[in-house]
Image (cartoon, rainbow, N blue to C red):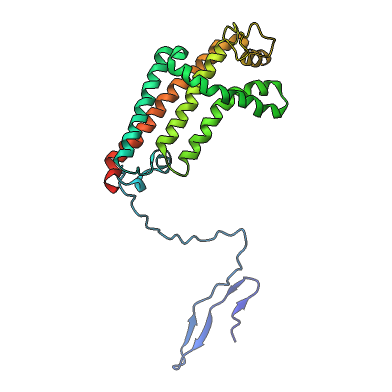
Amino acid sequence: MEIPYCKFLGIFKPMKDENESGIVEERPARQMVRPTKATDDVPLHLVSVKHETPSTFSLAEPGSWPVVMQFFLYPKTLAGTPFFIVRAFLVVMMAFYSVQLVQEGYDAWVAQFLHCLNLPVHETGHLVFSIFGNRVLHSLGGSLFQIIMPLVFCFALWIKPRDILGASIALWWAFENFIDVAVYIDDALHMKLMLISGGTGAEAPYGFHDWNFILSEMGLLLKYDTIANAVYTAGYVGMWLCVLWGAWSLFYYWFFQRNDD
């Protein structure tokens, strides 16, 4: 009888069968199946997935907007035309105040008025940052808190309620505080501004003028003008971006959301 398997060659030899006529037929040889190893290549069976074609971008369909655009630019629906008029007035006032600040700077009446509102926030910042026990942070805390507090209102109005106009006004306030702080920085060397004590920084002991102390401790006092100009620029640019952001929310309501009321 034919032995079907050859140990030394590791293959199956052809086997012979006799059919009913007595004719011997050879069956095709079977190859031995070798166990697979972890290092063997595994054949990939790729499955084609049908992707839906994204819808065409349209301002009227927020679902077609990129995620970033939805996050920054999709506003909540306003409560009717009267509410729209009030908000339009607020955007106009933001633009008007921005023009005043750009043209006249800290001498503008609006800057003086807002400074009276910012001053309590500034002094509160000194109290808040005093807990860190660092004199530089304590001095810096007043100016930082002037910017942090409006940002809190901005995010509170923006993230969940989607009140873009309210958020733009709060953010405008933060950038207006950049102007208020830049004036203080610009006075760091000469210290001619009248402080809350009733005298100028030059008349007060070292450390009383916040930015003279901060920049002196950091070795940047002679660069006060460069730093002040950078803060001024950030404030002016930021205020106008906020005006555009708020105006966008009104534009979108009037052309795409008004009929849904």
Q: Nearer the viewer, residue 236 or 220?
A: 236
Residue 211, relative to residue 156: is it above or below?
above
Residue 7, relative to residue 261: is it above or below?
below
In the picture, residue 39 is in which quadrant?
bottom right
Q: Is residue 182 left or right of residue 79?
A: right
Residue farthest to the front, as pictured: 198
Q: Nearer the viewer, residue 145 or 255?
A: 145
Image quarter of the N terminus: bottom right
Residue 27, how many percent across, how many down? 49, 81
Q: Is residue 48 left or right of residue 18?
A: left
Q: How many marks?
A: 0
Residue 233, how many percent across, how many down? 47, 18
Give the residue drawn at x 61%, y 26%.
124
Q: Is residue 214 left or right of residue 30?
A: right
Give the residue drawn at x 71%, y 24%.
134
Residue 206, how many percent across, how many down? 69, 11
Residue 27, relative to residue 102: is it above or below?
below
Residue farthest to the right, as pictured: 133
Give the residue drawn at x 50%, y 37%.
155
Residue 113, how many percent across, how many down? 47, 19
Residue farthest to the bottom, as pictured: 20
In the picture, residue 224 is in which quadrant?
top right
